[in-house]
Image (cartoon, helix red, strand yellow):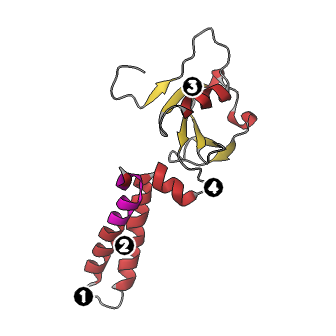
């Protein structure tokens, strides 16, 4: 790993003379780390994910192509395709198997925002008939949703 503290991912251990890296080897390497550790691999060092059994998926970076492969233990390998690289990491939960579990474990910020939105909506509905307290009900619902999202997501389990 580079010494730069701001680096978000590891560069894959590929040398200039290395022709190909196998997905099996990369997945084995990633499985030895905690979920979320990202490895960046040049695209010419791996076969295309669809040829290796991955399925098309979505991710937080909607402008990138995303692929996933479910592992036997319920986790999944998530691949984001950039122009020159694959950015690969293991998620704790496969969204195809457990969408709520995936949001809670692997996208806690999105989970918390979703809970806040649900709380805000519930507050709006609760205060719909009482114009005087509608704002207070909405704010209380959003705050309650934030708290619930934080406590039930990965952040609340540390």
Counting residues from the start of the chain, the first of labels 4 and 3 encountered is 3
Q: Earlier in the sequence, mark 3 or mark 2?
A: 3
Q: Secondary structure at mark 1?
A: loop
For the record, the magenta segment spans 146-156
Q: CA distance from mark 1 to mark 3?
A: 57 Å
- The local secondary structure at tag 2 comes to helix
Give the distance between the C-alpha atoms of the residues marked 4 and 3, in whole angstroms. Answer: 26 Å
Q: Residue at x 67, y 18 (%)?
A: 20
Give the distance between the C-alpha atoms of the residues marked 2 and 1, in whole angstroms. Answer: 16 Å
Up-down: is 145 above or below 25? below
- In depth, the one of 140 and 133 nearer the eye is 140
Dot 3: within a 10 Å radius of its alpha carbon, few (fewer than 14), some, or many (20 or more) residues?
many
Left or right placement of residue 113 versus residue 58 in this view = left
**Alpha carbon separation for disc pair 4 and 1:** 44 Å
The kind of secondary structure element at disc 3 is strand
| Residue position marked by numbered label 3 in the rendering | 41
Mark 1 is surrounded, within 10 Å at the Cα level, by few (under 14), some (14 to 19) or many (20 or more) other residues, namely few
Circle 4 SS class: loop
Mark with earlier residue (1, 3): 3
Kindly report which numbered mark, 4 or 1, lies closer to the viewer in this rendering.
Answer: 4
Label placed on residue 120: 2
Mark 4 / mark 1, whichever is N-terminal? 4
User: Disc 1 designates what residue?
Assistant: 132
First reached walking from the N terminus: tag 2 or tag 1: 2
Which of the 4 image quarters holds residue 7?
top left
Q: Are marks 3 and 2 in contact (CB under 8 Å)?
A: no
Disc 2/disc 4 C-alpha distance (Å): 28 Å
Task: State whether the magenta stretch is mostly helix, strand or loop.
Answer: helix
As drawn, the label of residue 97 is: 4
**Labelled pair 1, 3 in contact (Cβ < 8 Å):** no
Q: Nearer the viewer, mark 4 or mark 3?
A: 4
């Amino acid at each position: 790993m580079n010494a730069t503290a701001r680096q978000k991912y590891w560069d894959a251990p590929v040398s200039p003379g290395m022709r190909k890296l196998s997905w099996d080897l990369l997945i084995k390497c990633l499985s030895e780390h905690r979920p979320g550790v990202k490895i960046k691999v040049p695209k010419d060092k791996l076969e295309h994910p669809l040829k290796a059994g991955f399925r098309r998926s979505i991710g937080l970076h909607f402008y990138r192509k995303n692929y996933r492969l479910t592992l036997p233990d319920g986790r999944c390998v998530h691949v984001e395709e950039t122009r020159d690289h694959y950015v690969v990491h293991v998620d704790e939960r496969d969204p195809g198997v457990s969408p709520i579990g995936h949001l809670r474990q692997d996208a806690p910020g999105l989970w918390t925002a979703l809970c806040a939105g649900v709380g805000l909506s519930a507050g709006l509905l609760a205060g719909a008939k009482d114009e005087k307290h509608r704002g207070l009900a909405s704010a209380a619902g959003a705050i309650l949703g934030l708290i619930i999202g934080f406590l039930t997501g990965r952040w609340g389990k540390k």
